[in-house]
Amino acid sequence: MTPDMSVDVGGLKLRGPVLAASGTFGYGTEVPLLERRALAGMVSKGIFLRARAGTAPPRITETPSGMLNAIGLQGPGVEALIRDYAPQWADWDFPVFVNINGESAAEYGELTARLDGVPGVAGFEINISCPNVEQGGMFFGNDPHAAAAVTDAVRRRTKLPVWVKLTPMVSDIGIIARAAESAGADALCAINTFVGMSMDLNAYRPRLSFRTGGLSGPAIRPLAVHLAHQAARAVRIPVIGIGGITRTEDALEFLVAGCSAVQVGTATFVDPNAIAEVHDGIASFLETRGFASLADLPRYLPRD
Amino acid sequence: MHVISMQAPEIAVTVRAGQFVNLGWSPGPLLRRPFSVYRVVGDDIEVVLKAVGTGTTQLLAMEVGDRISCLGPLGRGFDLPRAGSVVLVSGGLGVAPMPLAAREAHGAGLRVTWVHGARTAAELCSESDGEEVVWATDDGSRGVRGTAVVAAPDGDVVLACGPNRMLAAVAERWPDAQVAVETHMGCGTGVCLGCAVPLKRGGYDRACTEGPVYRAAAVDWDSLPSHLPYAVSA
């Protein structure tokens, strides 16, 4: 029998546990080949109120089992998103979350107010963890008061689900996780990329024009499993695990570590059908182990 | 310079000159690597490469019958004129899209001038296809001493591919030339925004989707890195 793969993320029912991570799936209209039946949901490329050009090239470089990126949240701005993409999302059979960004809590609030009620927008993922912008971004994510202020600014302007995407660049992710939970987040996404750097030994300078970039890919997975687990232990709301998921077993590690769902990112760059393969692999795993549903999968989540 | 061939019938029938395939192999690097399609022979497509690092060494070590993951054809290729002549200008590995461009041009009844340059005679691509063939080497060891851009005659349409430094020189001489640029690439499908090409009008677009072929004068050459640190430490 096919196992029940549906999950509940803070009251939102998803048809499966695997979502597309922000910045790796565009606005959902670009990725070819993906079997969308397997897609539980997607998070859009990060958006600001206004259009942003992004950083100068080179923007990416490969590192051992990973990649560094500094795209700088290039995007067309919220009005273009509402005009060009949201109408398409409204017809899709999975929810689309918008990854929202701002340089102040007020900007996050304004962006939420503009998007709330737009057909096609199913919820918000607050990005307080982008390492590649000069203003805002990660700054909000490593201070509990700032994290709470941004979450609160968004929460006040929408009844749609609000997720908060956390940065790993903190000394205690539990403190930020609890701050976001207290300010009204429905779920947490853990984690965004680690800040990294790589030097070009011909030019004697960083390979990326932004100097630093966000490290993603299999290289960060054990770090991400740990941080997602720490976040899950710190709060009562669901945690969506992110970080280097490439294969079925990677996703299962996050789920066993206490996550309710996962997002697949960098793997989609390599294999546009990665999400479907991970989804189907989880179903096979559950079937082989005799679990009737994903909810029956044992979780390792000791409470202190 | 080496040519490797792979059976890819769906790509072979649809690929246009200037388009590329994104290749993944095991055990390869994490990300795929983009290659212009060099030639099409029946069901097979070919790409050219040099042994520059671990990845290309792995590709060159493959045996007949080994499998490779091939995503494509990707990007927007060259636009050929309806009549007249085309000049194909390439430097080094920039020769990659030219055999296919020559074949398409001949199919459209165009006259082809093939101009190919490299640092030395040993680094030239030995293959050519055109009514007129011009060789250029930096050290003068074969053909004209100097760059392919200097050695090339004018034509109705100029198609160029090579190091970005060379393409900037193409833009100076022929603003309307069509050039295939080289960038780092993440996904090849338009989602990662890693292959940003700076534009003269401001902003960036994606080499993998809007490109890799651009009108030469449209690119902001001063902002496009001329040196790509491709080596991967993985």
Image (cartoon, coloured by chain):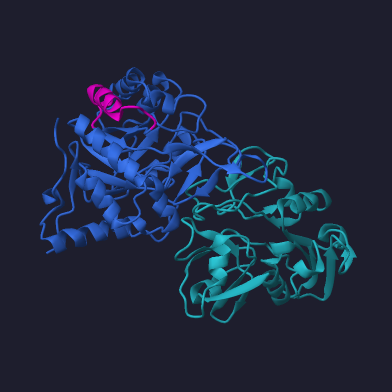
Q: In the shown orientation, is residue B191 left or right of residue A243?
A: right
Is residue A58 among what the camera can see?
Answer: no
Q: Considering depth in this image, is A98 or B94 the residue closer to the camera?
A: B94
Q: Is residue B30 above or below residue B69?
A: above
Q: Considering depth in this image, is B142 or B40 the residue closer to the camera?
A: B142
Is residue B103 among what the camera can see?
Answer: yes
The structure residue drawn at horizontal position 16% and vertical position 58%, both measured from the top left corner, is A286
Residue A102, given in percent of the width and then of the height, sits at 44, 26
Residue B65, given in percent of the width and then of the height, sits at 47, 80
Q: In the shown orientation, is residue B112 left or right of residue B23?
A: right
Q: Was residue A173 drawn as part of the magenta stretch in this picture?
A: yes
Q: Which portion, as a residue range, is magenta?
A: A169-186
Q: In the shown orientation, is residue B8 left or right of residue A35?
A: right
Residue B229, given in percent of the width and then of the height, sits at 62, 49
Q: Toward which corner of the image does residue B141 lie, by quadrant?
A: bottom right
Q: Is residue B80 above or below residue B9?
A: above
Residue A218, given in percent of the width and then of the height, sits at 39, 50
Q: Toward which corner of the image does residue B39 lie, by quadrant?
A: bottom right
Q: In the shown orientation, is residue A290 left or right of residue A189?
A: left
Colour of chain B in the image: cyan
Q: Quadrant of the N terminus of chain B?
A: bottom right
Q: Was residue B75 drawn as part of the magenta stretch in this picture?
A: no
State how many labels appear: 0
The chain shown in blue is which? A
The structure residue drawn at horizontal position 82% and vertical position 61%, both measured from the top left corner, is B148
The structure residue drawn at horizontal position 34% and vertical position 23%, both measured from the top left corner, is A147
Q: Considering depth in this image, is B183 or B175 the residue closer to the camera?
A: B183
